[in-house]
Image (cartoon, rainbow, N blue to C red):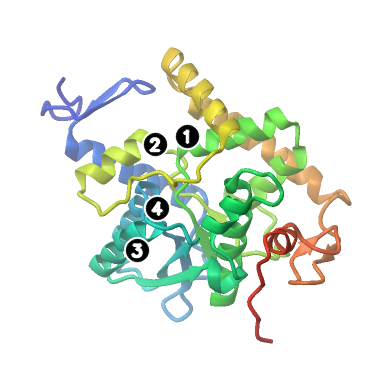
Amino acid sequence: MECDKCGDEAVMHATYSGMHLCEEHFCRSVDSRVRKRVREDALLSEDASPDDPETWLIGLSGGKDSVVLTHILDDIFARDPRVKLVALTIHEGIEGYRDASLDACLELTDDLSIEHEVVAYADEYGLQMDDVADEDPLDMAPCAYCGVFRRDALSQYAEEYGADKLLTGHNLDDEAQTAMMNLLSGDIQQVAKHFDASLGSFEDREIDDDPFVPRAKPLRDIPEKEVALYAHLKDLPTHMAECPHASEAYRGEIQGHIHDLENDHPGTRHSIMSGYEELAKLAAEAYRNSDDGPRGECERCGAPTNNEVCRKCELVDAVGGELAETGD
């Protein structure tokens, strides 16, 4: 195959667009789509300036997605005095897994000279995910516990650090799967929250009263295989092993269905996200005008909730953990 741009040997064929691209033009294409997403989402505030820069916290796991995101954002903003990039790695306490990915994080942030912080479940919640997975007091998949703890740790640290944005490496496949799971579950509130948390332009989101630092997903237009190819071609330090406790059976089933649809009907993932974002925006507008949002605070940690204790604190109690003391 020849590159449609220059005639050199192609390294990939994007069936959804019909394009064959060589290494140089493929990498340019990924970079260009991420830059476009940053612009369209109004990620950089008009008020940001060298005298008052924004701090963007990147959730860096060491996997291909977060590594590629960090690399591209550094390429765009390393010399922009309006933005300060900080990488945050969550150590869940999974023997032989997170330590290896942490090495990739350290190598990348050292190469890019990006500030890097590490937060551990052991320090924040007094627990290790290996122990939670072994004991499983609530008979849930380990991912159900870990997802709650991870989201909380990212949000809480971003708030404590004074970050203006929290950026994660979710790719097109991740987002299409989440969209379908939310729609098939019929959880309209979750659809609305998904929009206000991380979809659409910041100009369209209701973030002024959001108790958490707003999120952005600059890779959400890039298919997973293209992220992996980009990481390989750029020779980026990545940890490719799957978490030994990963067991999201439902997401895996949705992933398989979307994969089959994409093979038969190229562009399905893009179509799902295009329609879902419009629906999520409408749901978010309705949700904001209703009385269905969190009306109180967790009596343990202060997080927004409709219950006396939030889900995170419930799970910490269930597994015998202990929340870290917070200062005033």
Q: Residue at x 42, y 17 (%)?
A: 263
Indicate the position of residue 213 as horizontal and vertical percent values: 61, 64
| Extreme-left residue of the structure | 8
Mark 1 neighbour density, 10 Å: few (under 14) some (14–19) many (20 or more): many
Disc 2 marks a residue whose amino acid type is Glu
Tag 3 residue? 77
Q: Looking at the image, is mark 3 or mark 4 nearer the viewer?
A: 4
Q: Quadrant of the N terminus?
A: top left
| Quadrant in which residue 81 is drawn | bottom left
Q: Visible in this render: residue 67?
A: yes
Asked whether the residues under the numbered discs 4 and 2 touch, taking CB atoms below 8 Å apart as contact, a structural biologist would say no
Q: Quadrant of the C terminus?
A: bottom right
Mark-to-mark CA distance, 3 and 2: 23 Å
Tag 4 residue? 66
Q: Residue at x 56, y 58 (%)?
A: 131
Q: Secondary structure at mark 1?
A: helix
Work out whether residue 58 or residue 131 is closer to the camera in this orientation and state it.
131
**Mark sitting earlier along the chain (3/2):** 3
Asked whether the residues under the numbered discs 3 and 4 touch, taking CB atoms below 8 Å apart as contact, a structural biologist would say no
Indicate the position of residue 38 as horizontal and vertical percent values: 45, 52
In this picture, is 6 found above or below 198?
above
Indicate the position of residue 72 as horizontal and vertical percent values: 32, 54
Mark-to-mark CA distance, 1 and 4: 14 Å
Work out whether residue 32 or residue 270 is closer to the camera in this orientation and state it.
270
Tag 1 residue? 173
Q: Is residue 249 left or right of residue 99?
A: right
Work out whether residue 183 or residue 291 is closer to the camera in this orientation and state it.
183
Tag 2 residue? 224
Asked whether the residues under the numbered discs 1 and 2 touch, taking CB atoms below 8 Å apart as contact, a structural biologist would say yes
**Mark sitting earlier along the chain (1/4):** 4
Numbered mark located on residue 49 in the image: none
Q: Secondary structure at mark 3?
A: helix
